[in-house]
Amino acid sequence: MSTTPFRSPEPDRNFIGKAVRVVGQIFTREDLYVDGDVEGTIESLDTRITIGTNGRVQASIKAREVVILGQIQGDVEATDKVDLRKDAKLVGNITTARISIEDGAVFKGSIDIRKSEPKAAAPATPGPVAPSAPSSAPPAAVAPPVGGLPPGAVRR
């Protein structure tokens, strides 16, 4: 069961209502909540796409996170997570780093788990490097064992 509680869409987010039908391509940089019908493609690479309980989608979906409460027929690709809630129905393939499928969800397809790509870190600033010793230097001497005896020897 998912630990993330379901939230209704916020007023400043994109929303496709249950009486709306969209045919074509949707590109957004904000979270998107779909409670209507969509046919085509939906892409929102850095945000979350939620397919609501009334949502009926025949589309390929690409996003950071995809939450499914309704129905999808098409492939889903998420860089972070796909979450199928209890009444969700998905017929298609999933590619994601993490997945959650609640009891009661219906899924038919394949799952390809891929590690999420780490965010690019700032390159380390290299410090001064000491010159290496010439290769003709003799090997370092090995310190005698503790107690002065070789391993396995018994002092008498």
Image: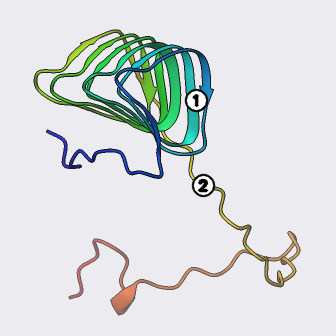
The mark found on residue 119 in the picture is: 2
At x 63% / y 81%, what residue is drawn?
141
- In the rendered image, which residue does mark 1 sit on? 43
Give whichever of 79, 30 is nearer the camera: 30
Side of 69 relative to 141 (left or right): left
Side of 47 relative to 67 (left or right): right
At x 79% / y 83%, what residue is drawn?
127
Side of 84 relative to 28 (left or right): left
Amino acid type, callout 2: Lys
Q: Quadrant of the C terminus?
A: bottom left
Callout 1–callout 2 Cβ contact below 8 Å: no
Side of 8 relative to 102 (left or right): right
How far across and down, in percent of the image, does residue 1 sit?
13, 38
Where residue 89 sits, quadrant-wise, is top left
Give whichever of 87, 96 is nearer the camera: 87
Q: Residues within 10 Å of mark 2 (few under 14, many from 20)?
A: few
At x 53% / y 28%, what residue is drawn?
62
